[in-house]
Amino acid sequence: MGVTKAPAIWSVGVVVAAFIVAAQGSPSSSARRPYSLFEDDGLSRRHGQRHYDFVIKESNYTRLCREKTILTVNGEFPGPTIYARKGDVVVVNVFNQGHKNITLHWHGVNQPRSPWWDGPEYITQCPIQPGGNFSYRIIFSEEEGTLWWHAHTAMDRDTVHGAIVIRPRRGTTYPFSKPHREIPIILGEWWNDDIGQVLADAISTGSDFQSSDANTINGQPGDLFACSGNGTFRLPVKHGKTYMIRIINAALTNGFFFAVAGHRLTVVGSDASYTKPFSADHVFIDAGQTVTALLKARRGRSNARHFYMASRPLATNPQATVDSSTATAVLEYVDAPAAPGDAAHGLPSLPAINDSSAAAAFTARLRSLASKGHPADVPRRVDEHMLVTVEVNEIACAPGEVCKGPHGNRFASSLNNVSFEMPRSDVLGAYYRSAVGGVARTDFPDNPPSPFNFTADDLPPELALTARGTRVKVLEYGAVLEVVLQGTTILGGDSHPMHLHGFSFYVVGRGTGNFDKRTDPAKYNLVDPPYQNTVSVPKNGWVAIRLRAENPGVWFMHCHFERHMVWGMETVFIVKNGKGPNAKIMPPPPNMPRC
Ligand code: C2O
Ligand code: CU
């Protein structure tokens, strides 16, 4: 099939790369290469066009003392890093050699006018069946910074994910001095059980999902876990140099705090956009988000050779089943003398697992590079206002069924009390053929069906009930949309990382309790709000986002906690074509997979 990946061109740091390879320990299958961080863009130089071959296949990996079969790209876990420059087009040829349907999504890439290559199954495409293939075009436009890619079928993104590094255009540079090296730090989770089984178990009884068995950093739980010392991710550094760490939360269940012992981080970006730099002891990163930070290695030589990096979840719902474990990795000063018995220093201090205010305090510091003199391009006039409640709910147990969710019902979740039901064939294809009515209703509500005190302590239990529907929202091309995402205390409440495909948006406001449309808009930040694709809606609070609907297509919006998405916390925006050829959806590629 001609899918062998070209060997990396080690432009710099051969020694360091070799070190990493050595430090990864031996993989359980000799045919597999370890996760390689420093492969650069050799492919594009060889072929003129930048492309990657991604073979979806099962592979055996050992973690937590057990071997199991996982789905991977090219046998790698985490998967390969995609390198691009701002404005590039990258082609990824996907060959499905696994045993199940799959799609891939380029999280945070707007894909202007090209929803065909966006990825979510049954929204923009039918999945690629076993034995099939599909070539995605990733069309980078305004994005610059750290993004990632992942499977967008069932729970497959658990192991099918990797980093996307978008560097400045050739001839331009970062808005800070160029770091010595850039390193993806992917925060994830590991289940001892098969992830398909975890999903099937939860669906069969309507119960909560079984929690993961370890949190991970670059695929490894770290040496606080049995049998995990050898594989621990190690980052080699040298005194006096600056490293850019591109932190990605690929986990299915939780946001994370992340810190490095003995070092502060300078945050310079979030999602695919730069932020005003600020220094922090720890970062908070919700599921689906990325944080780009600079880590200044210590200047003076000392004997200290090892420092722990650690991640620990934020879990805001005491009723949910949570993997509260701390994942670790090691920062290693390769130019320090090896001291006898030099174990890693202590763990960095991280906020407590339920410390939502620490998360909120971090999030509040994210500001885009704009200033009063050069404000960000935030739309001032709004055409469409939506208030959307974000709820974890229940759906009545069917007669004769045994349900293990709340009150003997099934767990569900909803937006404006619509629990999204996946259609059987893709919304985009139907819409393009002017037949959207065959798969969805275009009446997603702009407001909750009946307003209530969203964040009251004692909501009546009936409010927890929801119903399924495939209901989408249609927007005129160019309309300015403001969405207030409102958390609720139904079933206790939780935080929710809400992700929108096709756009980045300005996060103009956030608060606790109920959004007040008379007083809260006056407090919006219209000068330097962060520009993100995934926003953390605080537990029992709200956020307001704004965007211009200038990307025609069919775009998914959903909670990036996988169980909430499986339960229905999502909807779809259809942005109509505008006038003129540059405001219309491109025609579909000829080889779209069929349902
Ligand atoms: Cu990161 Cu719809 O996904
Ligand atoms: Cu959620």
Image (spheres, rainbow, N blue to C red):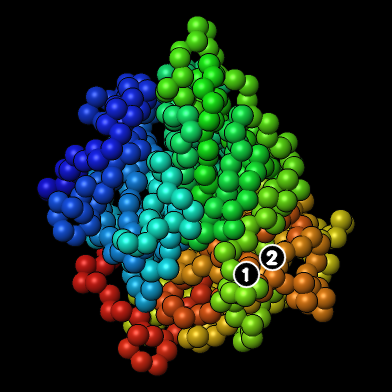
* Residue in front for this viewpoint, 158 or 249: 249
* Residue type of the residue flagged with mark 2: Val
Tell me which numbered mark, 2 or 1, is placed earlier along the sequence: 1
Which dot marks residue 543?
2
Say whether residue 404 is visible: no
Q: In the rendering, at what x and y percent does residue 527 appear? A: 65, 72
- Distance between mark 2 and mark 1 Cα atoms: 22 Å
Eye-nearest disc, 2 or 1: 1
Image height check: is 117 above or below 303? below
Find numbered disc 1 in the image and state the secondary structure of the residue it sits on.
loop
Q: Is residue 425 left or right of residue 365?
A: left
Q: Is residue 495 left or right of residue 192?
A: right
- Residue pointed to by mark 1: 371
* Residue type of the residue flagged with mark 1: Ser
Image height check: is 142 above or below 340? below
Residue plotted at (22% across, 29% down): 31
Image height check: is 183 above or below 518? above
Residue plotted at (62% across, 69% down): 371
How packed is label 2: few (under 14 Cα within 10 Å), some, or many (20 or more)?
many
Q: Residue furthest top?
A: 340
Q: In the rendering, at what x and y percent does residue 65 appear? A: 45, 19
* Residue in front for this viewpoint, 318 or 18: 18
| The residue carrying mark 2 has its beta carbon less than 8 Å from ligand 2 | no
